């Protein structure tokens, strides 16, 4: 292929491949870890009562309304909170801000497939660290020279939860690096699973969460990070050097409002956790091997059958799950926990296929 001279100076990257968003609404969509339940009623009221003339104005650059609501909900002061357009935006800003050395950033070999993409686009050197045969992190692998550390907890796409003690061990033994814990699924992991309390003790720990999964708002794009004032100040300096008005007014209002209905939040999260446990039983009855997921998805292997084939056959039946034809994980399907009804459709289809 001939390359023009101007192309030699182009920043070329291999982009992240997001899960498919089919137009067909009849698809049983268990492929992108969305929440099967709608956001709370209060969000609907905000939209109904919104005065469109407000759209003339730029949004609050500091997303103040939303930051205040997060501060109240999590008992964290405002200057320890950063918000972004989904946690993908937050994580990307954190990579750009904190991973700025010649040393390699460390993350697991099986993990969220956006990390290596951000590292590539920002020219950050990195090294992946193998998980053990049970898909667990060996914390001592991270006690070595590095330019930063990032991992999800629970991990994606395995759903494995590591303890707060283990994360603390990594943070404590890396005082010279920033450690980012991506808690996209933490609300499904039960009380006491979050590393948030550790930010009081360690000024190099950034905890990232999202409204996309547990709060049913993937389409609104809200993510946030919590950490020491210093970390947040550095992130804001970078963010305001790129684009001040990233989060639109409506998203800020809807996000703040969603946080006010804690009862609905717990109810829907508990329903998903119940359906997850029910689904674990059903899948093992169907002969699947499984990782003990603490998230809103299951990482399951159709023992003796090709996961790729099962994926295709489910697709033909309009049931979408996620599959990666990659070493170590090519025997697994990642199945989002939907409603109990959706899961029953899946189990019926699997019975026919297997
Ligand atoms: C879903 C997900 C995110 C991104 O979520 P946003 O929709 O951008 O908030 C980040 N990290 C992990 C591990 C995820 O699974």
Image: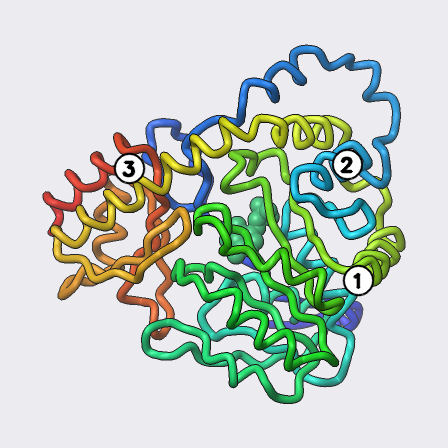
- Which image quarter: residue 305? bottom left
Kindly identify which residue carries mark 3.
318
Q: Is 35 drawn above or below residue 287 in the view shown?
A: above
Give the image location of residue 147, x and y in percent. Answer: 70, 80
User: Secondary structure under badge 2?
Assistant: helix
Kindly identify which residue carries mark 1.
231
User: Secondary structure under badge 1?
Assistant: helix
Count of numbered badges drawn on the protein: 3
User: Secondary structure under badge 3?
Assistant: loop
At x 77%, y 28%, the residue is 249
Label 3 neighbourhood size at 10 Å, few (<14), some (14-19), many (20+)?
some
Mark found first going from the N terminus, 2 or 1: 2
Kindly identify which residue carries mark 2.
68
Q: Mark 3 and mark 2 in contact (Cβ < 8 Å)?
A: no
Q: Can residue 17 be seen in this view?
A: no
Alpha carbon separation for disc pair 1 and 3: 45 Å
The colour scheme applied to this rendered structure is rainbow
């Amino acid at each position: 292929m001939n390359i023009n001279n101007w192309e030699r100076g182009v920043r070329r990257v291999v982009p992240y491949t997001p899960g498919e968003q089919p137009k067909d609404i009849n698809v049983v969509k268990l492929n992108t870890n969305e929440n099967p339940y709608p956001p709370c009623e209060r969000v609907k009221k905000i939209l109904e009562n919104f005065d469109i003339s407000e759209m003339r104005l730029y949004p609050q650059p500091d997303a103040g309304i939303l930051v205040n609501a997060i501060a109240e909900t999590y008992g964290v002061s405002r200057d320890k909170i950063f918000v972004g357009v989904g946690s993908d935006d937050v994580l990307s800003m954190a990579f750009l801000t904190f991973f700025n050395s010649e040393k390699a950033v460390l993350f697991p070999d099986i993990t969220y497939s956006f990390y290596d993409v951000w590292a590539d686009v920002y020219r950050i050197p990195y090294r992946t660290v193998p998980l053990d045969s049970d898909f667990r992190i060996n914390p001592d692998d991270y006690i070595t020279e590095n330019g930063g550390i990032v991992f999800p907890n629970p991990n994606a796409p395995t759903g494995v939860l590591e303890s707060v003690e283990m994360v603390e061990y990594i943070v404590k033994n890396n005082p010279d690096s920033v450690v980012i814990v991506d808690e996209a699924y933490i609300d499904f992991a039960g009380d006491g699973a979050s590393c948030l309390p550790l930010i009081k003790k360690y000024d190099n720990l950034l905890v990232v969460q999202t409204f996309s999964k547990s709060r049913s708002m993937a389409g609104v794009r809200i993510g946030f990070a919590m950490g020491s004032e210093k970390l947040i100040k550095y992130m804001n300096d970078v963010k305001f050097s790129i684009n001040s008005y990233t989060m639109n007014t409506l998203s800020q209002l809807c996000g703040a409002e969603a946080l006010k209905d804690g009862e609905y939040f717990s109810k829907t999260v508990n329903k998903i956790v119940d359906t997850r446990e029910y689904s674990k039983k059903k899948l093992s009855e169907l002969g699947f091997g499984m990782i003990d997921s603490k998230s809103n998805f299951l990482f399951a292997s159709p023992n003796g059958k090709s996961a790729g084939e099962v994926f295709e056959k489910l697709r033909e039946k309009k049931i979408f799950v996620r599959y990666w034809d990659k070493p170590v994980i090519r025997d697994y399907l990642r199945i989002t926990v939907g409603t109990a009804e959706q899961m029953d459709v899946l189990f019926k289809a699997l019975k026919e296929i297997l």
